[in-house]
Image: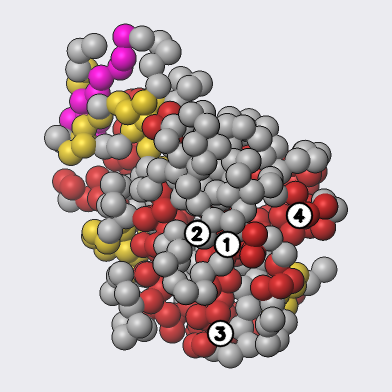
Amino acid sequence: MVDEIIIRKNVKSLSSAEKQDFVDAIKALKVNTKDAKIADNRYDDYVVMHAQTMARSAGTDANSDMRNLAHRGPIFLPWHREYLRRFELELRMAVPGVAIPYWDWTWDAVHKLTDSPIWSADFMGGDGDPDDGFIVKDGPFKDWATQEADQHTGKPTIKDRLRRTLGKEVSKLPTQIDVCNAFSFEFYDSPYWDVFSVGFRNALEGWTNGPQLHNRVHAWVGGSMEVNTSPNDPVFFLNHCNVDRLWSHWQDIRSDYGYPANGKIVDRKCNPIAGSNLDDKMFPWEKEEKSKTIGDVLDHRKLGYLYEK
Amino acid sequence: MSPKKEIYKGREIVFEIPDDDNYVGEIRVEIDGQHLHVIRLEDGTYGAHLLPYSNYPSLLELAKDVIDKVPQFRSARQ
């Protein structure tokens, strides 16, 4: 049971006060050093956590497809749902009442960059400076220090600065037609549960005729969003909130939320893919007493949040 | 399979392309002697942990993007 229902709003409908609260909450985690566990502040803990999943293969055949404990497989959507839920709860401890807003990038795909509320100086700030390595130099995250991570272990390495190359790697954001194409898949995923799979998950993650949807947004924002430590850019959470929203809509029209039955997700060698089956707990929370299984996170309403229509 | 070398923005990229066109698995790639995790996938493209949202049609393209985009590799010469 949940104590209260959180409403996740569209970025476009946030009031000035709500934008400020979200920015304040993010900054509060960045200066919270006393609760840090794996990096030197609580925000960077989430950055490192994400990089650690990238460095851990999932499945005994992962050497051929790079499937890992949060990406390139069926775990992609449940893992990020749980990751955002935990992050949001920490934001709310810093600033009560705050919620992660979603960025419906299909709107931005057909509007001018300057019309978008997301890149304003009172919210996410703008593009990087092309004359200085595309470092972001305006808005609340001006000169934001990033935490980089080792490619093999995900452990913290050097610090850098937040960088963006909006629209330079790929010129267009995903459109409503791209979303509709993903929704045309009636099933969640299929063998061998990787970047070559046919199904909704792989389409939404963006490997089908990629980069599309989620992957395309990472590429479009560019800079810090393109590497294994992409949560360094707070925009990461707005993108994934939208991805989660799209998944929740797709789930609403499927029985049992569309996730394959427990034990069905096996690799090319017929071994269960670690952390991907319905009753599996998710890394790196699997040792916590109350950690959730994939099955526990399929219904977002039971996790205590809804999406504003 | 013999190592190939390329210089890009003053950085030395060493890589080995397998003779077998159907090879799938880890590939040797180094930038200034630093090992880079790279996998050749079953469709012949290449992927790296450090650039997780794209697969690349060529090893060289991937290595150049690592130098341009990944802070640990970008800053090695700075």
Q: Name the residue under label 4.
A: A257
Counting residues from the start of the chain, the first of labels 2 and 1 encountered is 2
Q: Mark 1 points at which residue?
A: A293
Mark 4 or mark 3, which is nearer to you? 4
Mark 1 and mark 3: span between their CA atoms?
Answer: 23 Å
Which of the 4 quarters of the picture holds residue B1? Answer: top left
Mark 1 or mark 3, which is nearer to you? 1
Labelled pair 2, 1 in contact (Cβ < 8 Å): yes
Mark 2 and mark 4: span between their CA atoms?
Answer: 18 Å
Q: How is the image coloured?
A: secondary structure
Mark 4 and mark 1: span between their CA atoms?
Answer: 14 Å
Please state the extent of the stretch shown in magenta in the rendering: B8-19
| Residue in the foreground of this view, choosing between A107 and A214 | A214
Labelled pair 4, 1 in contact (Cβ < 8 Å): no
Q: Is residue A83 left or right of residue A227?
A: right
Mark 2 and mark 1: span between their CA atoms?
Answer: 6 Å
Of all chains, the one bearing label 3 is A
| Residue in the foreground of this view, choosing between A133 and B53 | B53
Q: Which amino acid does label 1 sit on?
A: Thr
